[in-house]
Image (cartoon, helix red, strand yellow):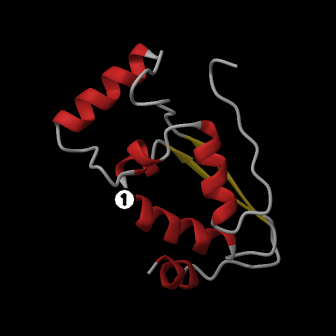
């Protein structure tokens, strides 16, 4: 489990801890990723996470050609499964809500368009 793996690292809970991730969650089923986030949110007294993840927008009418092509290519390649974070967290609000629901006290974010 993520909690057991973090315990093996012997992190000093009293030190501020920052986790960085870039395009990590998009390949992972949302349930597994939420389990990881819940473990990260409690592994230290002062923990932060910086995420850089794709935001595809509404599947029916996304205005981002790059996002549409990414989704199409990853789906055709079998990488983007129906339960993957890429397809389950399609908006910035979805991304922020996911962090809050997993125990982070505050979540702020922006996209490349606004």
- The answer to whether residue 19 of the structure is visible from this angle is no
Q: Secondary structure at mark 1?
A: loop
- The answer to whether residue 107 of the structure is visible from this angle is yes
Q: Position of residue 24 (x, y in %)?
A: 45, 49
Q: Nearer the viewer, residue 7 or 112?
A: 112
Against 7, is 35 above or below? above
- Residue at the (34%, 55%) spot, across then down: 83
- Residue at the (65%, 64%) spot, across then down: 101
Query: Image quadrant of residue 71?
Result: top left
Query: Image quadrant of residue 11?
Result: bottom right
Label 1: few (<14), some (14–19) or many (≥20) C-alpha neighbours in 10 Å: some
Instruction: Please identify the quadrant where the N terminus is shown.
Output: bottom left
- Residue at the (50%, 71%) spot, across then down: 35
Question: Is 9 positioned to the left or the right of 85 in the image?
Answer: right
Give the residue number, with chain letter if any, for mark 1: 29
- Residue at the (70%, 60%) spot, across then down: 100
Q: Position of residue 36 (x, y in %)?
A: 51, 68
Q: Nearer the viewer, residue 59 or 64?
A: 59
Instruction: Please identify the quadrant where the C terminus is shown.
Output: top right
Against 32, is 114 above or below? above
Q: Nearer the viewer, residue 112 or 22?
A: 112
Q: Position of residue 45 (x, y in %)?
A: 80, 75
């Amino acid at each position: 489990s993520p909690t057991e793996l973090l315990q093996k690292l012997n992190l000093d809970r009293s030190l501020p801890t920052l986790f960085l991730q870039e395009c990590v969650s998009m390949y992972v089923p949302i349930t597994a990723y939420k389990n990881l986030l819940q473990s990260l949110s409690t592994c230290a007294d002062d923990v932060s996470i910086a995420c850089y993840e794709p935001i595809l927008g509404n599947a029916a009418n996304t205005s981002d050609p790059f996002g549409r092509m990414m989704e199409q290519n990853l789906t055709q390649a079998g990488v983007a499964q129906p339960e993957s974070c890429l397809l389950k967290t399609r908006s910035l609000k979805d991304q922020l809500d996911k962090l809050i629901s997993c125990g982070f006290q505050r979540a702020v974010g922006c996209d490349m368009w606004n």
